[in-house]
Image: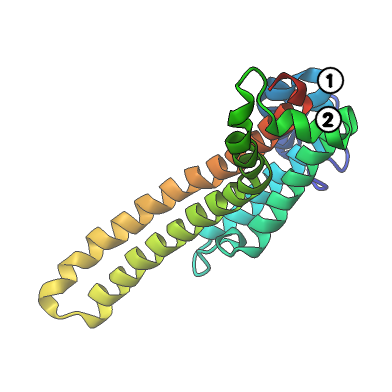
């Protein structure tokens, strides 16, 4: 981004044009679509940071001889989920105050009081425990699974080509082709995981801002 926007022109060209298209995609199709223009612009920095961090880090999953993303380890997904969680809680507490926000999030109106004994703990776990956990696991599991598949395909190619008997060498080409095709698929996953993580962050913030209309 520093390189692309170091000397921005009114009519963008080249890498500046690519950067602006990417920025507009997150701004329009994630932040503003979910939160509206006012709140979308307010929370755009955190949503934009999450999207491009996930996307950039995931790119290493398709770099030859590396083929693994830092998001395939639990550390970075936890940090990203914590950032999303803090933004979610901040938005609600800032608008409603802590007590009203928590109550609006976990207390479902219009149901028999006896049901609250069951539903309040479930809503609390769902909103304040499972959300950061699922954000972490979703990103971790997808990137780790992709890494394992790439390792299997390219390791199989190496085995069939250099270590297997002559009769098995014919399987080297199919495994190499599958590795290449899965690399193409992984490139799609790289983008989708960034988009989904940013989108869910925006959705959670929106739910926080409307905690009074459970």
Q: Do we see residue 77 in this rendering? A: yes
Residue in the foreground of this view, choosing between 151 and 134: 134
Question: Quarter holding the N terminus?
Answer: top right
**Residue shown at 27%/62% (left/top)?**
175
Q: Residue at x 58, y 65 (%)?
A: 73
Q: Residue at the spot x=37%, y=55% of the render?
A: 180
Whether residue 62 is visible here, answered yes or no, is no
Frontmost residue, 153 versus 107: 107
Residue 165: give x, y in percent of width and height: 15, 81
In the structure shown, which secondary structural element does the residue marked by tag 2 occupy?
helix
**Mark carried by residue 100:** 2
Q: In the image shown, does 129 or 33 lie closer to the viewer?
A: 129
Q: Could you give the CA–CA distance between mark 2 and mark 1, rounded to whole angstroms?
A: 23 Å
Q: Which mark is residue 38?
A: 1
Mark before the other along the chain sequence, 2 or 1: 1
Q: Is residue 164 above or below residue 103?
A: below
- Left-right relation of 211 to 116: right
């Amino acid at each position: 981004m520093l390189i692309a926007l170091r000397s921005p022109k009114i009519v963008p060209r080249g890498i500046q044009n690519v950067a602006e298209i990417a920025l507009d995609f997150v701004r329009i199709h994630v932040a503003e679509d979910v939160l509206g223009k006012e709140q979308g612009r307010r929370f755009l920095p955190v949503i934009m940071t999450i999207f491009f961090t996930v996307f950039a880090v995931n790119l290493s999953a398709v770099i030859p001889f590396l083929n693994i993303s830092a998001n395939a380890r639990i550390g970075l997904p936890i940090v990203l989920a914590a950032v999303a969680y803090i933004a979610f809680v901040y938005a609600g507490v800032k608008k409603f105050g802590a007590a009203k926000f928590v109550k609006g999030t976990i207390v479902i109106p219009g149901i028999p009081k006896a049901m609250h004994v069951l539903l309040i703990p479930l809503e609390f776990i769902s909103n304040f425990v499972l959300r950061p956990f699922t954000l972490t696991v979703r990103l971790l599991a997808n990137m780790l699974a992709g890494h394992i598949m790439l390792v299997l395909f390219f390791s199989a190619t190496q085995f069939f080509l250099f270590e297997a008997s002559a009769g098995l060498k014919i399987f080297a080409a199919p495994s190499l082709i599958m590795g290449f095709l899965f690399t193409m698929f992984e490139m799609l996953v790289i983008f989708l995981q960034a988009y989904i993580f940013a989108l869910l962050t925006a959705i959670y913030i929106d739910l926080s801002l409307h905690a009074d209309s459970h």
